[in-house]
Image (cartoon, grey):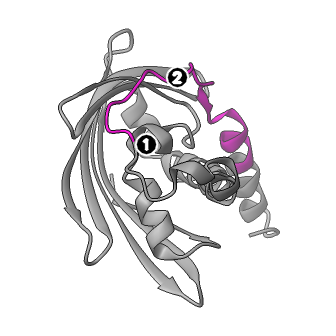
Amino acid sequence: MPDITQSFVVDQPAQAVWQLLQNVPEVVTCIPGFTLTGQEGEATYKGKVRIRLGPVVGAFEGEATVVDVDEATHTTRIEGQGLDKQGGSRARASVTYTLSESDGKTHVEIVADMKLTGALAQMGRTGIVNDVANQITGEFAKNLSAKLAAAPAATPATEGSSPPRQAAPSAPAAEISGGKIILRALLRSIGRLFGFGR
């Protein structure tokens, strides 16, 4: 699979966004479809994610480790892997995100090198994975912005304190569904076939 590149802008200073992104349990609550189940040490987190791409469903269990944090450049690299015990699909990913600030707003760039095997790998070759990544990134950006906007008013007494490092299990999350995405991709293909639409 080719690298997946995503980006979005948050209407907050880079330092505020950076501080929140270092609090992995809080960040996971912003990612649709993900559930945090535990933590090992200070940098390895265990979790689950359920993905549906048309008739193919993957219920992955795995872990992600924060392997490199560069505060000077606001860059972090995370390595993760997961296994779908029922379907047999496997996933590995190396994800790097970088923050940059302009006019008081933060530009977040995410680059993911993903490798899929099993049934979901067949769907990955169709380009649907990129569409799902767009959907997840859009919802994540919206949730992250809302959390940052609410944080000062919600926790004035904890300003300047360090975020909790030990993760508690998060509430179960709904699965990431690619059904509508597949339908939109099909309609776009039909439109191109008949010479209309983009």
Using the numbered discs, state the Cα–Cα distance from disc 1 to disc 2 in whole angstroms. Answer: 11 Å
Q: Residue at x 41, y 73 (%)?
A: 99
**Figure quadrant of the C terminus:** bottom right
Q: Amino acid at mark 1?
A: Gly
Is residue 167 inside the magenta stretch? yes
Above-or-below relation of 48 to 91 = above
Q: Identify the residue at the far front of this view.
A: 157
Range covered by the magenta-colored residues: 164-184
Residue 109 tag number: none
Q: Residue at x 76, y 50 (%)?
A: 187
Q: Position of residue 96 (x, y in %)?
A: 30, 61
Above-or-below relation of 152 to 64 = below
Identify the residue position indicated by label 2 in the image. 56
Q: Identify the residue at the far top of this view.
A: 86
Q: Residue at x 25, y 57 (%)?
A: 77
What secondary structure is found at the residue carrying circle 1? helix
Residue 124 tag number: 1
Can the viewer see residue 90 in this picture? no
